[in-house]
Amino acid sequence: MADALFPKTHKYRTIHSMSDYRVGALMDLVGEGVPLFVDYGCHLGHVSFEVALRERTELVLSVDNFRGTEGDELMAGTVRDLAGDGGDFLFRFLENLNEMRPQLFGLIIPMRAEFFWEIAAPALRGEVDIACIDSSHRPEDDWEFAKLSELVRPGGVFCGDDYTNGHSPNVADRVDEVAADPQYSWIHQDSFFALRKASA
Ligand SMILES: C[S@@+](CC[C@H](N)C(=O)[O-])C[C@H]1O[C@@H](n2cnc3c(N)ncnc32)[C@H](O)[C@@H]1O
């Protein structure tokens, strides 16, 4: 049964979360862990937790605005359920992390997207082993794809969700633009996408 594939982290998903198939494709890339993983659009944390449970993971940056996707009514309902009318669910992420395994505090660093872009990203260019994106999908935010791909180290992977979902065609367009960079080559191309950056 699909839900049994990631039993420790499955409860930290919502209807917006990556499916077992996509998490499985991602974990095939992660293997026993990667030193630096960026979970961009971390939501309630299941992907970050799954990666951090691997032996060789050293740091997971779990990035989100923790307020939901602007203009997405379905997600607004989810956020209300999670966080009430305050609409900020960072505390739910922290509660989940504490429940999952308190020892992972420090290895997993939750970070608001605005701070990530302002403070962390400039220091991370070419340093990230795997950057996985599953965030807003709005055309207004789709600059995030190119910017995130710039953080990937030579030999590292840029990947994410919803490449072939009809409801977010701009995701496919932005990913195709990154893939057109000769430094990148496809390693997975369906609803989950993954591109490997050439080694230096
Ligand atoms: C589809 S959900 C992610 C699901 C998550 N990857 C999972 O598998 O559980 C999209 C997430 O992106 C966040 N988000 C929306 N706009 C964002 C933005 N511009 N920057 C960062 N995160 C954003 C939302 O708050 C939401 O948690």
Image (spheres, rainbow, N blue to C red):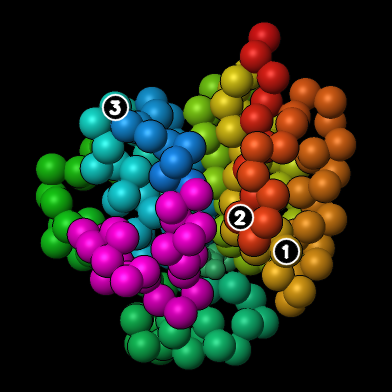
**Residue 124, placed above or below residue 103:** above
* Viewport quadrant of the N terminus: bottom left
x, y (%) of residue 27?
A: 42, 44
Q: How many marks?
A: 3
Left or right: 114, with 173 as reference point:
left
For label 3, the residue is 56
In this view, the mark in front (1 or 3): 1
User: Alpha-carbon distance for marks 3 and 2?
Assistant: 23 Å
Mark 3 residue CB less than 8 A from any atom of ligand 1: no
For the point 72% across and 37% down, which residue is it?
186
SS at badge 3? loop
Q: Residue at x 44, y 41 (%)?
A: 28
Residue 155 in sight from this viewpoint: yes
The stretch of residues the image draws in magenta is 1-25
The residue closer to the viewer here, 80 or 49, is: 49
Disc 1: residue Cβ within 8 A of ligand 1's nearest atom = no
- In the picture shown, does residue 73 fall above or below 59? below
Q: Position of residue 130 (x, y in %)?
A: 52, 35
Q: Which residue in the protein does label 2 denote?
A: 192
